Image (cartoon, rainbow, N blue to C red):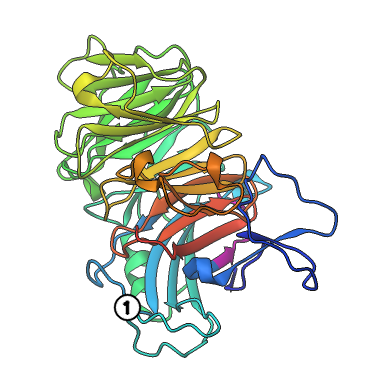
């Protein structure tokens, strides 16, 4: 694996340097590049930007909570993550643990911005990537999630048809310490469940009940896992009676940020449903949320009645659960021109949400901005069709699958795509 902090194909159209051109907005999926034009990375658009090229593509990853503190803005930055591979042969697949350190602020010529703190703002040292891996011989990893309360406990959905729980605490602790150790680890799964009739994608750990897990499959079944004796070596017990109601695949699951027994699901039947563990008779609330498959959902951790959903039709919507199923969404955006593949609320700003699409874009939105707020402001050519709430557009990756905000590094986003990972912090207040 290698780290490359040189950007490519990011922000603006670069014409012949000899031409006297006017800067204008270039809209992905709408505007075409003319002969001799190319998209170029603008370093001034990023406070930080790094890329990682893994050995194999990863459909899914998760950012791991560390012990370095909350709200970190000083450079250089350090972060931990885990990801699951899509290798060319089943037995080659693995869970990879990553430690990225010495991530510096993007160097911009004549940059006088001292907003971000740094011990040595002029250094241009390369970032460092340390990693180790755990064999995942059951198949490629559809989705991977780390338990919030114990980052070393990791759940995976295998394309072999079963979900697994792994205790990676020991290799993670060694990696985090920086001490020398083996790169390759072979660990038995701490738990697995063979009751799903098909493979799946939906997977989520409870933020309020340690060890509580949900898995959903392509047949529409949702299973609830509980830690037996606290989880870990004691394992997990899976309720053999599934939650049913979706007609087709369950695409995503999200636990409530405030109620330990309440969760939400999204499916290819175009619905978003709200459930309670104590009520097996069916979902408590249901809404046909989109005109196509609902691929992803995100429950706002700061404002518990707000939920974002993203669909195959390229739309993402914001829902108020106080009126869920009885009214239209409170916001509906159709900027992306291909299916929405990931959506997540910012943990540091309750009104900010990031969205990834199969159109090779990541967009960042501030829903507190009203259209009227932008009236009267000078806007560059082409900006009239840009929603006032759209803060930032990130490009340069191919076939983007997932994004996450870093819980401890405000404004930092990590994303995975067919051609690797990006870790970046936009030069906008998020």
Disc 1 element: loop
In the image, residue 252 sits, relative to residue 172, either above or below, namely above
In the image, residue 235 sits, relative to residue 26, either above or below, namely above
- The residue most toward the front is 376
Frontmost residue, 88 versus 148: 148
State the image coordinates of residue 176 (x, y, percent, origin top left). Answer: 35, 72
* Quadrant location of the C terminus in the rendered image: bottom left
In the image, residue 57 sits, relative to residue 285, either above or below, namely below
Frontmost residue, 85 versus 120: 120
- Magenta span: chief secondary structure: loop
Identified at 29% across, 58% down, the residue is 407
User: Can residue 175 be seen at all in this image of the molecule?
Assistant: no
* Quadrant location of the N terminus in the rendered image: bottom right
Frontmost residue, 328 versus 283: 328
Task: Inspect the magenta stretch and tell me whether residue 243 lies in it.
Answer: no
State the image coordinates of residue 350 (x, y, percent, origin top left). Answer: 25, 47
State the image coordinates of residue 257 (x, y, percent, origin top left). Answer: 20, 39
| Residue 41: quarter of image | bottom right
Q: Which residues are magenta?
A: 51-60
């Amino acid at each position: 694996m290698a780290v490359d902090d040189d950007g490519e194909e990011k922000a603006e159209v670069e014409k012949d340097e000899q031409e006297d051109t006017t800067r204008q907005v270039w809209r992905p999926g709408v505007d075409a590049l003319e002969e001799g034009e190319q998209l170029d990375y603008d370093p001034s658009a990023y406070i930080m930007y790094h890329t990682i090229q893994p050995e194999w593509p990863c459909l899914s990853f998760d950012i791991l909570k560390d012990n370095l503190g909350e709200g970190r803005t000083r450079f250089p930055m350090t972060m931990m993550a885990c990801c699951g591979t899509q290798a060319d042969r089943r037995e080659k697949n693995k869970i990879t643990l990553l430690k990225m350190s010495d991530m510096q602020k993007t160097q911009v010529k004549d940059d006088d911005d001292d907003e971000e703190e740094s011990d040595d703002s002029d250094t241009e040292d390369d970032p460092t990537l340390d990693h180790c891996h755990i064999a995942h011989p059951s198949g490629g990893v559809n989705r991977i999630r780390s338990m919030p309360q114990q980052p070393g406990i990791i759940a995976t959905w295998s394309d072999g048809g079963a979900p697994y729980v792994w205790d990676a605490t020991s290799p993670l602790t060694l990696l985090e310490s920086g001490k020398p150790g083996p790169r390759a680890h072979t660990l038995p799964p701490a738990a697995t469940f063979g009751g799903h009739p098909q493979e799946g994608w939906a997977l989520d750990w409870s933020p309020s009940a340690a060890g509580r897990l949900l898995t959903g499959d392509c047949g529409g079944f949702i299973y609830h896992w509980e830690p037996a004796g606290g989880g870990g070596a004691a394992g997990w017990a899976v309720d053999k009676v599934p939650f049913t109601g979706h007609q087709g695949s369950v695409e995503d699951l999200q636990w409530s940020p405030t109620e330990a027994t309440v969760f939400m699901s999204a499916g290819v039947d175009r619905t978003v449903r709200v459930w309670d563990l104590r009520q097996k008779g069916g979902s408590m609330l249901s809404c046909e949320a989109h005109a196509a498959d609902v691929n992803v959902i995100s429950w706002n951790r700061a404002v518990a009645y707000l939920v974002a959903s993203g669909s195959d039709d390229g739309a993402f919507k914001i829902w108020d659960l106080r009126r869920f199923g009885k009214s239209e969404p409170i916001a509906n955006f159709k900027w992306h021109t291909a299916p929405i593949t990931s959506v997540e609320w910012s943990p540091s700003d309750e009104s900010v949400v990031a969205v990834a699409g199969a159109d090779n874009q990541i967009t960042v939105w501030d829903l507190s901005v009203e259209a009227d707020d932008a009236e009267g402001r000078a806007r560059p050519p082409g900006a009239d069709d840009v929603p006032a709430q759209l803060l930032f557009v990130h490009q340069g990756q191919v076939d983007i699958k997932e994004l996450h905000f870093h819980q401890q590094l405000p404004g930092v986003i990590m994303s995975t795509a067919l051609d690797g990972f990006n870790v970046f912090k936009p030069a906008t207040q998020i």
